[in-house]
Image (cartoon, rainbow, N blue to C red):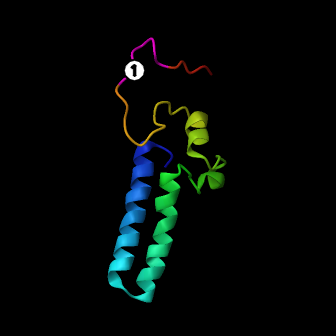
Amino acid sequence: MASRTGRWTRMLTGAGMVMGGLATGSPKGKLMALAGLLPLLAGAFDLCLFGPFFGLPVKGEAIRRKVGLIGEDSLLPHPPLSMAERPTLLH
């Protein structure tokens, strides 16, 4: 969930919940829209709220560093790095 794809999935799911909830106009819809703000904002601010349940930090950057996902820090992909520019992962 801390990867670029996971963040986009959370943001799009949250946005869909907000839009769908507001479109109904009912009190339950407003509650759904309010609940949709959680995944939307968590993805936008790079937070993974389920991380502590799996023994991982809340911040997405710290999770990626811990599991070795390098280069997935931004929401938009970067052009590939040359071999000289790639960071070295030492275990």
Judged from this view, the residue extending furthest toward the top is 84
Q: Residue at x 49, y 61 (%)?
A: 39
x and y, in percent, of residue 56 in the image:
64, 46
Which residue is at a point 40% across and 51% down the rendered structure image?
Answer: 8
Q: Give the range drawn in magenta.
A: 80-86
Eyeballing the image, is 80 above or below 32? above
**Residue 9 image point, x, y percent:** 40, 54
Total label count?
1
Does residue 80 appear to the left or right of 28 in the view shown? left
The amino acid type found where label 1 is placed reads Leu
Magenta-colored stretch includes residue 84: yes
- Within 10 Å of disc 1 (Cα), the crowding (few <14, some 14-19, many 20+) is few
The dominant secondary structure in magenta is: loop
Nearer to me, 43 or 56: 43
Q: In this view, does 40 lie to the left or right of 91?
A: left
Q: Name the residue under label 1.
A: 81
Rendered position, 4 above or below 27: above
- Residue at x 47%, y 18% (from the top left corner): 86
Mark 1 secondary-structure assignment: loop
In magenta stretch: residue 19: no
Query: Where in the figure is residue 81, as x and y percent of width and height?
Result: 39, 20
- Horizontal and vertical percent position of residue 67: 57, 36
* Residue at the image position 37 percent from the left and 31 percent from the top: 78
